[in-house]
C-alpha cells in the first residue's frame, strides 16, 4: 500500500520510495527513509499532513503515492 | 571573519540573524522566506560578518536555495559555520549538520527553541552532543534572545582544527571515500585527461579541507560538483561497487547511513518526555485542516481579517485620522456630540434662511427691508430645498414658511457678524468715495487700504475697547461666524489648519502655501490617514503568520490550486504578497518548476498588498458607507483572478504541464509573543510611513505641480481651474481608455496612472484632485457611485503593480518578453474585469446605457468562459518551456 491510500490517521512505516531522481532524494533528505515511522495527522483527498523525524510535513497526494508503506 | 548562518527552513535563522546583528530582516513563520543571502555585522564585534543563508534540508542540489547555500559554502570559503538547529526536531536537523561537518570548516552548533524543548519536558544533553559532533554546541532561544552572548563567545574562540571525520560511515563507504580523495588529488591512473604535465596536487582546484566533501559528492554522483572540477576523476567503478554491495543507489546509501548514525546517538543525546502523545499542534491540525471544514474556516478567517481591519476598528480610526488629524480638527475627550448637534442646527437654519430669501426675492420682496417679515407672511412665501434625510436615506423636500424663517433667524443671530464693525467700515469707505453696494467693493477697499475704527464692549471686562477693522476682517464679519468648536470641549485643530495658520504667520508665498497645503498635506495626508487600518491589517496578518496558521493555508489550498494548475507552493509568495508584492514576487524563486514560477510571478500581485488597502478602505468607507462585504470581496477578487489565470494559462502551450508536487514543512502552532507580533506589525507599517515620506511625497509634489499649473492663453501659469492644468491635458489624453469602465474623467484616470509609482498614490492623487471646501473625502463620495467605485477599485487592484513590484517581476522573469507579457496580461485583465463590473452592474442600476461596449463586454465574457471551460489539449503533456529551474 502507498501512503496516499491510507484510510485513517495513525502510524505507518516506510518500506521504500517508488520515485526516482530528485524527488526521491528530496524525500529522503526530509526524513522519508525505509523503516521510518510516519504518523498521519490529517488527510484531505490524498493530500496529507504527517509527522516524520519529529517534524510536520505537508505533502501532496502525487508525492504520497510514491511512498510505499 | 565571516560566519555563515546555516540551518533547516523555518528553524529561526533569520530571527537569530536579527538578534546577532541588530538587523531587521523580514521573519516569517513558514519555510522559504529567505531566498537570498543577506549579510550583517555582529553587534558585539564589528569584525565578524554574519551571512544569513536560505534554509536548506541538505547540501544536495535539488532546490535553488540549496544551490545558493552550497555555492556560498564551497566558493566563498567562510571562516566558520554557525549551524542553527531546531531543538524540538533534532533528528531531521542533525541530518544537515552531519553534512556541514564534512565541509572542513569550523562549525558551531546552536540548538534553538530550547524554551519549547524545556516546556515539553524533554531534555537535550549538550555535553554528549558536543562530544558526538566534536563541535561546540550552544543552547539558545533566538525568539527570547537567550544564549546569544554565548554564541558570540563561541564564535570568537572558535577552534581552527576541525573534527572532519565526526560522523563515521561504514567501512565500505569510508574506503570508497578514501579512494576517491586519492583520485581527486591526481592519481594518474583514473584521470580522463592527460595529467602528465601537471604536478601532483595541482590536478584539481579542490582546497584540502573540502576534499572529503567533494569525494562524498562524487560518490553520490552529484553532477554539479563533477562539472565544477577541472579534471574530474573516474569514480564509476567505486560507485558501482558500493551500489552492488548495498543494492541501492549511492546517494540513498549515504542518506541512510547518516540517519542511522543520528538514530544511534539519539538515546545518549536526548530524552523525550512523552513519545506518542498527540501534541496540541496535531489536535489543531485535525480541525483546521479537516477535509470538510478546512476551506470554510479559511474563508471565514480571511473574511474576518479584512472585515475587521477595514470595516470596524479600522474605519473608526481612519475617520478620526482623515476628518480630524488631516481635516479640520477633532475633540479630545467629550464635546463632539454637543458640537455636532449645534452645527447641524446652525446649518439647517442657514439653509432655511437662504431658501426663504430666495423665494421671497422671486416674489419681488426685499429681505433687507424692515417690514420684510410681515410682508412675506402676508404674501404666503414658502421656501423649498432638498435635504438628505439620515433616517430614510433619501433626499426629501423641506418647506420653510415665515414662522420657521423667524425661528431660524434667531438660531443664526448669535453667530452673525458684528453689525457695528460692518457699519463703521462701510461708512469709512463711503467717505473715501467707494460704493459698498458695488460687486467689487471688498477688492476696491482692500486696494484703497481702508481701515475703520469702532468701539466694542469687551465681554469679560465690560469696558469699551477700540477695534480696527480692515477689508479682510470686514469680509469675515459679513459672512458671519459659525459655532466655534473650542466652546464645546477640548478642540484639537487638524494639521492642515495648524499649518495654514503657521504659514500665514510667517507670510509664506502663495505658491508655497498651496504646495504644502494642497499638494503635500492633501496627498501624503490622504495616504497617512489610512495608517490605522494598515496597522490593524498588519497586526492580524502578523498574528496569523506567527501562530502557524498561514502555512496551513498553503496546504489547504494546494488541492484547490492544483485543480487550477497552480501548486500550493505558489501560495507562499501570495501570502507574503498580502504585505508587499516585492518580497512576494521574490519568494516565487523557491518554486522549482519554471512554468509554475512564471505563473506565480504573474499572479502574485493580484492579491491586495498593504499599499492597496487605502484604496479599498477609501471606497469601502466613502462610497459604500462601510458595508461589510466590500473589503473582504477585494481579497477574494484577488484569489479569483489568480485561480482563473491559472486555469486559462495552463491551457496554453506556454504553461502546459502539471504543477510540481507539493511538499512543505509546517511549523508547530504556538501562541506568538505580543512583542513579536507588534514588532512585525510596526516594521511593515514603518516601511509604509517611510515610503510616504519619500516616493509618495515626491509623487504628490509632482501631481500637485502638474495639476496646479498649465498653459492658459499661451502663457504658462498657475491655473485657477484645475481643468486647465497640465495633468488635465495629460489625463484627458488617456481617459478615453477608462471611459467604458465608467470613470472616464481625467482625475480618476490620472489617479490610476500615478498608482503605478506606488499604489498609495491612487489615494494621494485623489486627495489632491478632489481637495475642496467640503474635504476630499466628501468630494470623492459625491463623484463616485458605488458601481463606478467598484469598477475603479477592481481595476486598481488587478492592474500592473507599482514600479518596485514591476522591477521585481522583471528580475524574476529575467526575460523582456515575459516581463511585458505579465504586465500586459495584468493590465488587460484589470480592464476587462472593470469593464464587466461597470457595463453589467451599471446596466442594472441604469448608470450605463446599452452600447458598443456592452456588446464588447458580453463578447469578452463569453470568450472568458470559453477559455475557462475549454478542453485542455495539453493535459499530461509537457509544455514547450518546461525546463527545470537549474541556474
Image (cartoon, coloured by chain):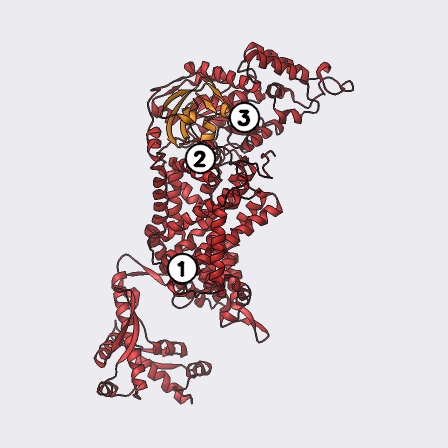
Chain colours: A orange, B red
The circle drawn on residue B81 is 3
Who comes first in sequence, dot 2 or dot 3? 2
Q: Quadrant of residue B457?
A: bottom left
Residue at 41%, 26% (x, y): give it: A5
Hey, which quadrant is residue B394 in on the image? bottom left
Label drawn at residue B30: 2
Which quadrant of the figure has residue B653? top right
Dot 1, crowdedness within 10 Å: few (<14), some or many (≥20)?
Answer: some
The alpha-carbon separation of the residues under discs 2 and 3 comes to 23 Å
Q: Of the residues tagged 2 and 1, which is closer to the observer?
A: 1
Q: Earlier in the sequence, mark 3 or mark 1?
A: 3
Q: Which residue is mark 1?
A: B841
Q: Nearer the viewer, residue B24 or B173?
A: B173
Q: Secondary structure at mark 2?
A: loop
Q: Are marks 2 and 1 on the same chain?
A: yes
Q: Is residue B367 above or below residue B697?
A: below
User: For numbered disc 3, what is the local secondary structure?
Assistant: strand
Question: Furthest-right residue in view?
Answer: B197
Chain of residue at mark 2: B
Amino acid at each position: 500500500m502507498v501512503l496516499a491510500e491510507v484510510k485513517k490517521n495513525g502510524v505507518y512505516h516506510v518500506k521504500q520510495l517508488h520515485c526516482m531522481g530528485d524527488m526521491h532524494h528530496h524525500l529522503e533528505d526530509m526524513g522519508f527513509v525505509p523503516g521510518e515511522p510516519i504518523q498521519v495527522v490529517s488527510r484531505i483527498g490524498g493530500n496529507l499532513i504527517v509527522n516524520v523525524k519529529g517534524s510536520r510535513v505537508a505533502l501532496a497526494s502525487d508525492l504520497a503515492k510514491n511512498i510505499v508503506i | 571573519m565571516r560566519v555563515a548562518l546555516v540551518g533547516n527552513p523555518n528553524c529561526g535563522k533569520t530571527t537569530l540573524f536579527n538578534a546577532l546583528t541588530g538587523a531587521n530582516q523580514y521573519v516569517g513563520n513558514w519555510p522559504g522566506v529567505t531566498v537570498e543571502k543577506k549579510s550583517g555585522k555582529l553587534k558585539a564585534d564589528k569584525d565578524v560578518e554574519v551571512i544569513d543563508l536560505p534554509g536548506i534540508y541538505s547540501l544536495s542540489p535539488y532546490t535553488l536555495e540549496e544551490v545558493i547555500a552550497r555555492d556560498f559554502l564551497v566558493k566563498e570559503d567562510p571562516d566558520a559555520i554557525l549551524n542553527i538547529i531546531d531543538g524540538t526536531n533534532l533528528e531531521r536537523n542533525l541530518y544537515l549538520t552531519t553534512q556541514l561537518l564534512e565541509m572542513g570548516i569550523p562549525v558551531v552548533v546552536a540548538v534553538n527553541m530550547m524554551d519549547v524543548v524545556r516546556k515539553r519536558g524533554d531534555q537535550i544533553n549538550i555535553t554528549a552532543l558536543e562530544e558526538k559532533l566534536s563541535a561546540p554546541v550552544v543552547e539558545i532561544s533566538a525568539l527570547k534572545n537567550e544564549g546569544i552572548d554565548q554564541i558570540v563567545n563561541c564564535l570568537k574562540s572558535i577552534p581552527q582544527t576541525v573534527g572532519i571525520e565526526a560522523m563515521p560511515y561504514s567501512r565500505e563507504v569510508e574506503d570508497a571515500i578514501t579512494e576517491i580523495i586519492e583520485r581527486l588529488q591526481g592519481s594518474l591512473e583514473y584521470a580522463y585527461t592527460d595529467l602528465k604535465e601537471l604536478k601532483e596536487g595541482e590536478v584539481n582546484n579542490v582546497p584540502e579541507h573540502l576534499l572529503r566533501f567533494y569525494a562524498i559528492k562524487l560518490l553520490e554522483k552529484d553532477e554539479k560538483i563533477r562539472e565544477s572540477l577541472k579534471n574530474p576523476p573516474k569514480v564509476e567503478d567505486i560507485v558501482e561497487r558500493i551500489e552492488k554491495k548495498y543494492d541501492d543507489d549511492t546517494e540513498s546509501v549515504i542518506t541512510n547511513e547518516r540517519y542511522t548514525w543520528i538514530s544511534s546517538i539519539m538515546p545518549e543525546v536526548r530524552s523525550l518526555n512523552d513519545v506518542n502523545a498527540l501534541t496540541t499542534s496535531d489536535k489543531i491540525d485535525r480541525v483546521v485542516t479537516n477535509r470538510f471544514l478546512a476551506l470554510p474556516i479559511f474563508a471565514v478567517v480571511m473574511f474576518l481579517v479584512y472585515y475587521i481591519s477595514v470595516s470596524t476598528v479600522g474605519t473608526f480610526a481612519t475617520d478620526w485620522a482623515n476628518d480630524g488629524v488631516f481635516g479640520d480638527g477633532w475633540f479630545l475627550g467629550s464635546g463632539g456630540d454637543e458640537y455636532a448637534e449645534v452645527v447641524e442646527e446652525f446649518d439647517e437654519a442657514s439653509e432655511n434662511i437662504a431658501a426663504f430669501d430666495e423665494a421671497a426675492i422671486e416674489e419681488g420682496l426685499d429681505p433687507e427691508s424692515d417690514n420684510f417679515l410681515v410682508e412675506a407672511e402676508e404674501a404666503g412665501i414658502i421656501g423649498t430645498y432638498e435635504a438628505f434625510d439620515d433616517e430614510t436615506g433619501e433626499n426629501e423636500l423641506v418647506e420653510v414658511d415665515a414662522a420657521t424663517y423667524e425661528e431660524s433667524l434667531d438660531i443664526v443671530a448669535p453667530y452673525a457678524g458684528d453689525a457695528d464693525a460692518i457699519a463703521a467700515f462701510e461708512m469709512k469707505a463711503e467717505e473715501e468715495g467707494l460704493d459698498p453696494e458695488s460687486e467689487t467693493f471688498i477688492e476696491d477697499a482692500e486696494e484703497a487700504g481702508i481701515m475703520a475704527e469702532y468701539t466694542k464692549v469687551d465681554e469679560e471686562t465690560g469696558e469699551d475697547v477700540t477695534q480696527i477693522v480692515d477689508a479682510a476682517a470686514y469680509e469675515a464679519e459679513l459672512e458671519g461666524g459659525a459655532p466655534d468648536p473650542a466652546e464645546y470641549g477640548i478642540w484639537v485643530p487638524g494639521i492642515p489648519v495648524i499649518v495654514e495658520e503657521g504659514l500665514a504667520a510667517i507670510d509664506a508665498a502663495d505658491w508655497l502655501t498651496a504646495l504644502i497645503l494642497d499638494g503635500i498635506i492633501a496627498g501624503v495626508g490622504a495616504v497617512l490617514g489610512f495608517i490605522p487600518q494598515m496597522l490593524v491589517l498588519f497586526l492580524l496578518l502578523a498574528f496569523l503568520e506567527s501562530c502557524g496558521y498561514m502555512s496551513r493555508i498553503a496546504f489547504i489550498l494546494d488541492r484547490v490550486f492544483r485543480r487550477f494548475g497552480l501548486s500550493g507552493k505558489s501560495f507562499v509568495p501570495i501570502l507574503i504578497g498580502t504585505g508587499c508584492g516585492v518580497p512576494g514576487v521574490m519568494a516565487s524563486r523557491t518554486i522549482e518548476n519554471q512554468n509554475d514560477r512564471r505563473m506565480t510571478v504573474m499572479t502574485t500581485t493580484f492579491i491586495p498588498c498593504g499599499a492597496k488597502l487605502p484604496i479599498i478602505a477609501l471606497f469601502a468607507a466613502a462610497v459604500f458607507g462601510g458595508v461589510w462585504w466590500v473589503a473582504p470581496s477585494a481579497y477574494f477578487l484577488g484569489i479569483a483572478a489568480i485561480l482563473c489565470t491559472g486555469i486559462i494559462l495552463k491551457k496554453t502551450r506556454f504553461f502546459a504541464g502539471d504543477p510540481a508536487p507539493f511538499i512543505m514543512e509546517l511549523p508547530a502552532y504556538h501562541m506568538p509573543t505580543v512583542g513579536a507580533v507588534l514588532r512585525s506589525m510596526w516594521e511593515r507599517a514603518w516601511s509604509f510611513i517611510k515610503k510616504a515620506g519619500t516616493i509618495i511625497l515626491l509623487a504628490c509634489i509632482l501631481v500637485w505641480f502638474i495639476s496646479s499649473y498649465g498653459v492658459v492663453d499661451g502663457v504658462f501659469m498657475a491655473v485657477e481651474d484645475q481643468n486647465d492644468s497640465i495633468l488635465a491635458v495629460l489625463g484627458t489624453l488617456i481617459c478615453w481608455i477608462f471611459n467604458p469602465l465608467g470613470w472616464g474623467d481625467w482625475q480618476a484616470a490620472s489617479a490610476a496612472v500615478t498608482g503605478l509609482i506606488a499604489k498609495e498614490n491612487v489615494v494621494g492623487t485623489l486627495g489632491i484632485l478632489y481637495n475642496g471646501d467640503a474635504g476630499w473625502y466628501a468630494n470623492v463620495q459625491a463623484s463616485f457611485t458605488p458601481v463606478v467605485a467598484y469598477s475603479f477599485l477592481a481595476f486598481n487592484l488587478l492592474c500592473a503593480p507599482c514600479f518596485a513590484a514591476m522591477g521585481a517581476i522583471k528580475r524574476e522573469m529575467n526575460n523582456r518578453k515575459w516581463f511585458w507579457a505579465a504586465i500586459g496580461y495584468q493590465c488587460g485583465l484589470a480592464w476587462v474585469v472593470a469593464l464587466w463590473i461597470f457595463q453589467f452592474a451599471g446596466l442594472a442600476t441604469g448608470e450605463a446605457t446599452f452600447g458598443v461596449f456592452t456588446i464588447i463586454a458580453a463578447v469578452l465574457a463569453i470568450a472568458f468562459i470559453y477559455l475557462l471551460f475549454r478542453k485542455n489539449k495539453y493535459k499530461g503533456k509537457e509544455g514547450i518551456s518546461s525546463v527545470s529551474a537549474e541556474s
